[in-house]
Image (cartoon, helix red, strand yellow):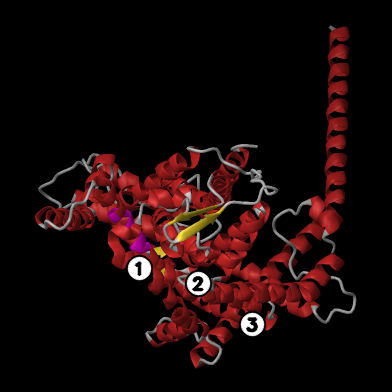
Amino acid sequence: MSGAALGLEIVFVFFLALFLLHRYGDFKKQHRLVIIATLLAWYLCFLIVFILPLDVSTTIYNRCKLAVNSSPAENNGSYVTLAPSSKQKCFKPWSYIPDGIMPIFWRVVYWTSQFLTWILLPFMQSYARSGGFSITGKIKTALIENAIYYGTYLLIFGAFLIYVAVNPNFNLQWNQLQTIGIAAANTWGLFLLVLLLGYGLVEIPRSHWNGAKRGYLLMKTYFKAAKLMTEKADAEENLEDIMEEVRKVSESIKYNHPLRKCVDTILKKCPTEYQERMGRNMDDYEDFDERQNSYPSEKSLAKLHKQVIYSVQRHRRTQVQWQILLEQAFYLEDVAKNESSATRQFVHTFHSQEPENKIIQYFYTPTVEWYWECLLRPWFYRVLAVVLATFSVIVVWSECTFFSTKPVLSLFAVFIQLAEKTYNYIYIEMACFLTIFFLSICVYSTVFRIRVFNYYYLASHHQTDAYSLLFSGMLFCRLTPPLCLNFLGLTHMDATISHKNTQPTAYTSIMGSMRVLSFIADGFYIYYPMLVVILCIATYFSLGTRCLNLLGFQQFMGDSEMTSDLIDEGKELIRREKRKRQRQEEGENRRREWKERYGNRDDSTRSRAVHTDQKESSFSETNANRQAKENSVEI
């Protein structure tokens, strides 16, 4: 089994990243390089999370072997290694990874992710948003936009090297410079990590608890409908304005103009109905005379191309989200109606537009659906919310006490050390996986939820643009390494935290010794995570939501008058869409009934008419043949 667990997890994580990317991205319409770069970034980050528990169990086994091979009581500085008794043996874990594999694996994964997040992905973001009409033009635009970005890093790094070379007290080697670079990247990531973690630790349990409240979810859906309708109308108006500008440019630049190829490229990005409309309004071929008319420049066309891509993507996204929100609102209204059903069978107002699986229909009957949706699901969400809240409390407590080694106050460290005494590797891996998985869910779910106006927004059902996908890959690559270091600190597997002279994990050895920067290792890394308490309190009382509401960004708040007005507006919008859908279904049903009732009569009438025509034609042919014979006899 050596290395088998590592290989299985590598394959599983790849398909997990591919599934999530397929849910948010669009493989058919987005550029392949964007898909590959985002997939690689997500894959490497998820890989770190899933493989780290195997590294911990392998490290504990290696420590056991060192303890067996050493003397019964060997003093290594401040830590005393006690060898196991003669009866106790070091059992190899089922997921044991041979020596030498993990350091190479972590080195490749870490430095590839850092290259992506600091160099390649920022460049690809500018490339994806560029309105250039050639690869060279897009690369030029991306280099210009990232000149300040890259120049700032080079300036800081150059100033640091000059300071080290001039100061005689510093005698840094290459590995120490490498550690300083890693520490700087992890410090930036930890700063953002604590902010996202403080939000997720409170919001995830609360969202599941509110998920058991049908009335709450329905009111929030009405609120979202009112906001989304405003955004949808704004997107439609913006698209109309951009298409009008495209129409003017298309009419001014004729087919023999040098920039006509650029205009054709812009037209291909427009919706089909606008392309047909502009094609009908095009005049015939006209001679190109540069002296008589003023034409837009290639730079202005590139800007228009960029606006067309953005407006079309936004319009398509709002249309899809509106349909999804309508289905969600209809479903929640159906649940509210079926809660008082005496037959205990779930009845849908509208039939599903997509064909359902026959296996699901066989097991998930209307009765089973009623018991799950109206009875069991609310209790399941409440129990899950309590479990998640318990995990959140343990994380907050451990974040505030993980620096204490005597006594050990971090609960995660206590669990791992108890399992380490009996070398229960299955328990160690499960405890490590659940811990880091919960931390990752709290952080990653916040990345998927946040929205920075219309520049960054991860929308499901293939509606995320290339810029947001690449930006999410950057965030994941910057957040995952400090997240894993924080996890190792919570479990006291990091020697910097535990102050024990033991064999480090392969992941920690790649990070290097943070003793090079003692003010970061003994200060920022230990005390900054305590800020998560303040952030959790702020999230619990919705201080951020209230601040955004005061600034004019409408948020869902139960005690707000504006929220009540938007809920009423959304309820009316849903009611209109419901009546519209009902009228459409009634019309389809009437046409279907008419076809079933009179379709057979029409078919029989047509067949009877065809048969009569065939008889008449055969009778006429027979008469014609008789006359021909009679004439021949007379002759």
Residue for badge 1: 522
> Is 473 situated above or below 368?
above
Q: Which quarter of the image is occupied by the N terminus?
A: top right
Query: What is the crowding at mark 3: few (fewer than 14 residues within 10 Å), some, or many (at least 20)?
Result: few
Q: Are marks 2 and 3 in contact (CB under 8 Å)?
A: no
Marks 3/1: CA distance?
45 Å
Q: Position of residue 167 (x, y in %)?
A: 11, 58
The crowd level at tag 1 (other Cα within 10 Å; few <14, some 14-19, many 20+) is some
Residue 601 appears in the figure: yes
Q: Nearer the viewer, mark 2 or mark 3?
A: 2
Point 64% across, 79% down: residue: 210
Amino acid type at mark 1: Asp
At x 75%, y 63%, the residue is 351
Tag 2: amino acid: Lys
Give the amino acid at mark 3: Tyr
Residue that badge 3 annotates = 216
How many numbered marks appear? 3
Determine whether label 3 and label 1 are within 8 Å by CB. no
In depth, the one of 444 and 143 nearer the eye is 444
Question: Is 616 located above or below residue 396 in the figure?
Answer: above
Residue 17 visible within the image: no
Residue stretch rendered in magenta on the structure: 180-189
Quadrant showing the C terminus: top right
Which sits earlier in the primary sequence, circle 2 or circle 3? 3
Asked whether, in this view, residue 101 is left or right of residue 186, the answer is right
**Residue 406, numbered circle:** 2
Q: Position of residue 7 (x, y in %)?
A: 58, 39
Give percent across and percent down for residue 387.
67, 73
Q: Which is in the foreground here, disc 3 or disc 1?
A: 1
